[in-house]
Amino acid sequence: MGDAEDALPQRLNSRQRRREQQQQEHEGGETVSGVEDGAAQEPGATSGRQGGERGPGLGEGSSEAAPFGTCSAPEPRAASHGTGPGPGSGQGAGVEVAGVEVEAVTTLEPLPEYRSAAVGQFKFEYLDHTADVQLHAWGCDLAEAFEQCGLAMFNYMSPLEHVRLRETRTYRAEGHDLSSLLFAFLDELLFEFNTELFLAAAVHITRLDREAWVIEAEGRGERFDRSRHEVGTEIKAITYSAMSIAEREGDAEVFVIVDI
């Protein structure tokens, strides 16, 4: 019994060396790694390799998996999408992580770069929203962000590149906090357009009082003329929906959804 126990490691090592030698012959000299002592290789596990292609790993019936997150489609047979065979290998498409099966990713849509859709030299962009549009404006401080948001609203109704700076109008709005102040300011600009058809291509806030919650501003532009100005999309009203105001040192931004 003692002799048999002493000979057992030698037989296992010899068996392992034969498996590794056979594996290297099929792979054209590649070295097999990660073989556990005493692990049996199923018949045909190394078959199907041609040339330099990499075939199924030990104990698998599928090709070696691509890194997780790539867009490669899974094989007709079960294929793992992790960095190697996982607990769920050979059971279905995808990979099992911590006991939870994750479906394979076939397409990945890149997220748009932050503030990448700015209109011309302005500091605003338009973000899609169900049935409405979201204005995103920013600046070096809150006053500039508010100004740019007003310009974004005018530009959506008629591109400002065609508006000349011929007249000056003054605006005043009041609120009880920043959100209501921004709402009232934009509503005042929109009211001026609806009643006087005045398009401001430049807006400058002369007073932003956070104690009395008052904004005073000037707008330069001209009256809308259908023969000269391009007709954009009518903005019916400002909304509080998902309104957001963020302020940091040297930077501020606002998000406002308007009803169109």
Image (cartoon, rainbow, N blue to C red):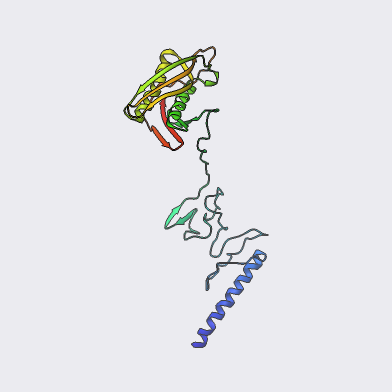
Task: Say which residue appears at 44% left-offset and 54% top-offset.
Answer: 101
Instruction: Return the x and y of residue 227 as percentages of the image width and height.
Output: 54, 12
Location of residue 13 by image quarter: bottom right
**Which image quadrant: the C terminus?**
top left
Task: Say which of 175 and 238 sits in front.
Answer: 175
Above or below, comparing residue 159 to residue 35 in the picture: above
Task: Say which residue appears at 52% left-offset and 44% top-offset.
Answer: 108
Asked if residue 134 can be seen in this view, the reply is no
Instruction: Return the x and y of residue 140 as percentages of the image width and height.
Output: 47, 33
Horizontal side, residue 128 vs residue 43: left or right: left
Task: Say which residue appears at 59% left-offset and 77% top-offset.
Answer: 14
Instruction: Return the x and y of residue 148 as percentages of the image width and height.
Output: 47, 27
Above or below, comparing residue 74 to residue 109 in the picture: below
Q: Residue furthest bottom?
A: 2
Q: How many numbered circles does the render carry?
A: 0
Horizontal side, residue 21 vs residue 119: left or right: right
Task: Say which of 253 and 19 sits in front.
Answer: 253
Task: Say which of 45 and 113 sits in front.
Answer: 113
Asked if residue 196 can be seen in this view, the reply is yes
Location of residue 241 by image quarter: top left
Instruction: Return the x and y of residue 60 as percentages of the image width and height.
Output: 54, 62
Task: Say which residue appears at 51% left-offset and 48% top-offset.
Answer: 105
